[in-house]
Amino acid sequence: MKLKKILSLGLAFVLTASLAACGSGNPAPSTNTGGGTETTAAGSDAGAGSGEVAAQGESGVLYSNGGPSEFFETPWLNPGTYMYNKVLYGHLLWADENLSPVSGEGDLAKSYEMSEDGKTLTFELRDGITWHDGEAITGEEIQWNIEYALKSTVLNSVFRSTFEAIEGAEAYINGEADSISGITVDGNKVVLTFAKVAPDALLTFTQFAPLPKKYLADTDPISLQQAKYFQSPIGSGPFMVDEVQMNNYTILKPFENYYGGAAGFTIHLNPSAGDSDANFVTNAKAGKLDYAYTKNIADVKALEGVGGLTIDTVNVRYTRLLYLNKFNKEDGSPAPLADQRVRQAIAYALDMQAILDGVFEGAALPANSLTPDGPDKVDGLNDYAYDPEKARALLAEANWDPNTELDVVYYYTDQMTQDLMAIIQQYLADVGIKMNARLVDGDLATILWKAPEDPVNGPSAVTWDMCYAANAALSLHEYYDRYATGYSINSHTPSDPKLDELIAATNASIDAEVQKQAFFELQKYENETLFELPLYYQPIFLLRSDKIESGADKIGNPQFNYNWNVQNWKIK
């Protein structure tokens, strides 16, 4: 197995150590992450002396995982988590491998134009584009998709923010209008007029997949995922559904009328969760996995020395953290973590480098911000290097009651998470902080993210003090917007005028440099006040077999959509 290191251009952290310092052993659900990469250096063969060589499957077939078990997941929630979401559906625009919108020509749109003030976005659809059933794709369907999506409950938060910024969207959502006034259609031309700047508008349309109206118009958008359509979806991408045996296998065949040309191979999907495949290693060795990704360092280690496979480390926006509940308790008593000094003490009390070396075999990097290292992060942030004496001093200043026991919740069921909780408990006990960690399941949206009715004074609508979780962000806005006053899932951070001001500044312009400087100021405030506690950054491992002869050289975040030209790959 050849191991390559991929260094991010736009957002990711840089890994400079060996395989043991490149990954994560803690697979987790992914929601919407952003980012991309470029190959800048090739690593050496790993364990080449073992002599084992992966088998090759049937000729002319690309094997992957993430096939459906009960239904195809809607592409509007986690837009590229599954291989089928990336190949069954077209998108109005293209993103490059760094998830930056490609200028000029689009995907379903042959061209687009954004006004200088960010208030008008115009698409010109390609002539002759069709759905897999041969029906033409129309501008009216693009409008219908945006309006229908806003009424669904399975919509990525970046998409929703963009659509809600369109002029007339609020009246439409409230039932005061039958359509969104800011969307106009004239033949192949679709024009969006925004009531306010939508900073991720172009990014949204590289990921949002229009669906054919005729199959879904009679489906209640609240029940979108349950629609019969998602048993065998019709899309507009380079591949179409050929055969589905749920929880067994799925075959995708080339779409012969795809505007970008027809592929010369089929795709065979094994059923699995998008980033947690129990059969990853077995299938890779057996020739049943040619292109797939994992977040599990154990998968990578198990494939060391296996010939015919290449695994790339792809750095992405994926941050594990502790959400810190700062709202008053239900009885009106202050939250244990309301004092900034207590939050800082917790940061100093944790030796994250030692924790990652021990629990995760060094397969991640300590975090000092939600934003991973790279050009999108400001320099000079405090790393909160392990300093238990400083932690104790801060707790003394804050008059910490050593009898207080923090309620810490988590929802991952793997052993590494349990080990991590036990180690954090030990570190905190060493400085005089008690904690009790407990697994939660069931209605996590309510248990974890129910916001208080009063976003200024509380009290808290959730019972926990700290929540161990992950944030996989399509854009930097997705990292930080949730901390604004009154945000729908802000269960943890009371109104903070300074924080609101800084978040608003990041959303005030479509200019990338203006946004960058605004995020720099927000990161400084985040690092000082610790309104959340970032723990570590986790990459993804992308596997490719030698059965792919050419074409798969563009490597970006495999959880999202970018112009990877898959229909022109050459497969043995």
Image (cartoon, helix red, strand yellow):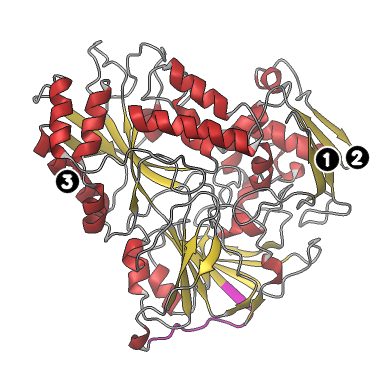
* Residue of label 2: 187
Q: CA distance from mark 1 to mark 2?
A: 6 Å
Q: Is residue 379 left or right of residue 94?
A: left
* Residue of label 3: 422
Query: Which quarter of the rendered picture does the C terminus lie within?
Result: bottom right
**Counting residues from the N terminus, which is met first, the one under dot 1 or under dot 3?**
1
The crowd level at tag 3 (other Cα within 10 Å; few <14, some 14-19, many 20+) is some
**Counting residues from the N terminus, which is met first, the one under dot 1 or under dot 2?**
1
Q: Position of residue 423 (x, y in %)?
A: 17, 47
Identified at 47% across, 77% down, the residue is 309
Q: Nearer the viewer, mark 2 or mark 3?
A: 3
Q: CA distance from mark 1 to mark 3?
A: 55 Å
Q: Verify CB contact (< 8 Å) between mark 1 and mark 2.
A: yes
**Counting residues from the N terminus, which is met first, the one under dot 2 or under dot 3?**
2
Q: Nearer the viewer, residue 292 or 152?
A: 292
Q: Is residue 238 left or right of residue 134?
A: left
- What span is in magenta? 52-62
